[in-house]
Image (tube, rainbow, N blue to C red):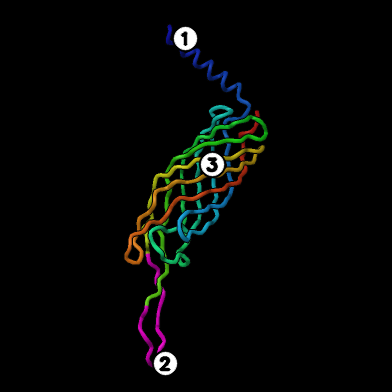
């Protein structure tokens, strides 16, 4: 009997919580942004994201961020020139929570996320000397080869987040903490810095007021 009463009270509480919400539970966000990696010689690039989410309440939501950033990761522990390093892709699949400070049209929020970051292989072009052409002007004959510095791999990453919703538009800033990738450059140990700052602007479909 007590169990039935507790279950009934729980069901009523859930129904009241659902009915008291001002915003619809489901929404899907999509947008673009700028990704700035860290490390010596790094170069920023673009990102795109898709983020479906579910509102546990007006103040709290649970989301899935699917993001792809194209950047040139920085190097630490080496003085090698980064200009010839290829751009690489960092794709991530992360869960996050977001807490809203307001239920007005302008809704600031903060949150955090955790998940898998897939890092593409890092390559660079090197000049290989073939020999000297003694029949002409004594010019050095060379060709360019692509050298693999790190294989593609997956790492667990974490990010804090700040931003705001304005109507159906959203602006957010995430800083993605991802463990470094160890490599060897010119015979010395070095590491690629996988961290990056993401500045994102997007639109939300669904999730508006009831």
Residue 145 among magenta residues: yes
Q: Secondary structure at mark 1?
A: helix
Quarter of the image for residue 51 reads top right
The total of numbered circles placed on residues is 3
Q: CA distance from mark 2 to mark 1?
A: 98 Å
Place of residue 101 in the rendered image (x, y in percent of width and height, measured from the top left): 59, 31
As drawn, which residue projects farthest toward the bottom?
135
Q: What residue is rendered at 62% in x and 43% in y?
A: 203
* Numbered tag placed on residue 51 in the rendering: 3
Place of residue 42 in the rendered image (x, y in percent of width and height, measured from the top left): 48, 59
Contact between marks 2 and 3 (CB within 8 A): the answer is no
Q: CA distance from mark 2 to mark 3?
A: 62 Å
Q: CA distance from mark 1 to mark 3?
A: 39 Å
Considering depth in this image, is 173 or 77 the residue closer to the camera? 77
10 Å crowding of disc 1: few (<14), some (14-19), many (20+) = few
Residue 39 among magenta residues: no
Mark 3 or mark 1, which is nearer the start of the sequence?
Answer: 1
Q: Secondary structure at mark 2?
A: loop
Q: What residue is rendered at 49% in x and 50% in y?
A: 196
Q: Secondary structure at mark 3?
A: strand
2 sits to left or right of 203: left
Compared with 19, 142 (above or below) is below
Compared with 173, 70 (above or below) is below
- Which region of the structure is painted magenta? 129-147
Q: Quadrant of the C terminus?
A: top right
Query: According to the image, label 1 marks what residue?
Result: 5
Quarter of the image for residue 30 reads top right
Query: According to the image, label 2 marks what residue?
Result: 136
């Amino acid at each position: 009997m007590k169990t039935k009463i507790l279950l009934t009270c729980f069901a009523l509480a859930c129904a009241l919580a659902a009915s008291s919400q001002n915003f619809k539970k489901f929404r899907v966000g999509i947008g673009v942004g700028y990704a700035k990696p860290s490390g010596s010689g790094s170069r920023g690039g673009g990102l795109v994201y898709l983020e479906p989410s579910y509102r546990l309440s007006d103040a709290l939501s649970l989301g899935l961020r699917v993001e792809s950033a194209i950047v040139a990761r920085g190097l630490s522990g080496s003085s090698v020139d980064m200009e010839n390093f290829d751009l690489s892709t960092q794709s991530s699949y992360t869960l996050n929570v977001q807490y809203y400070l307001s239920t007005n049209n302008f809704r600031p929020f903060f949150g955090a996320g955790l998940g898998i970051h897939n890092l593409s292989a890092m390559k660079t072009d090197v000049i290989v000397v073939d020999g000297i052409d003694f029949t002409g002007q004594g010019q050095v004959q060379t060709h360019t080869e692509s050298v693999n510095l790190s294989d593609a791999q997956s790492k667990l990453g974490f990010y804090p987040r700040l931003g705001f919703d304005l109507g159906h538009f959203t602006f957010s800033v995430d800083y993605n903490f991802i463990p470094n990738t160890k490599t060897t450059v010119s015979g010395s140990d070095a590491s690629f810095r996988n961290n990056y700052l993401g500045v994102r602007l997007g639109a939300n479909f669904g999730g508006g007021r009831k």
